[in-house]
Image (cartoon, helix red, strand yellow):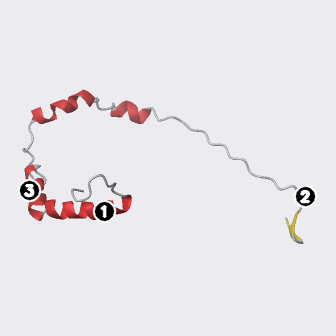
Amino acid sequence: MTSNPGKRITFFEMAGLFQVAYNRAATVEKAVTGFRVTGIWPFNDDIFSDEDFAAAEVTEEPEPDRASATTSIPTVLIQTATPSIDADRQVRIRGFSAF
């Protein structure tokens, strides 16, 4: 980009440009550090405090009442119709008779 100011990047050049930046930035050390500081590995259940989750309280919904949820299952009635074949009618395709 710095060597060609004003030139547009095509869709086909995106992967090559991304690869150069990614190969410089992505390291195993950064990946391991990311897992460690989030408490994923080694597992650390105490990495976040209750205050860290305070923003999620806005979208918190109460647990559904399991007793009423299992007793109020709606009844669904499914009716099927059996197709009938008209014995007086035949289908002819290229001399082939069906039914």
The alpha-carbon separation of the residues under discs 2 and 3 comes to: 76 Å
User: Measured from the top left, where is residue 17 in percent x and y?
Assistant: 26, 61
User: Measured from the top left, where is residue 78 in percent x and y?
Assistant: 62, 42
Q: Quadrant of residue 95?
A: bottom right
Q: Amino acid at mark 3?
A: Thr
Q: Secondary structure at mark 2?
A: loop
State left or right for residue 84 relative to residue 44.
Answer: right
Q: Secondary structure at mark 3?
A: helix
User: Measured from the top left, where is residue 39 in percent x and y?
Assistant: 10, 50
State left or right for residue 79 relative to residue 44.
Answer: right
The tag on residue 15 is 1
Q: Which residue ends up furthest to the right in the rendered image?
A: 88
Residue at (83, 56) in percent of width and height: 85
Residue with the mark numbered 2: 89
Q: Nearer the viewer, residue 92 or 34?
A: 34
Residue at (32, 55) in percent of width and height: 7
Q: Nearer the viewer, residue 13 or 24?
A: 13
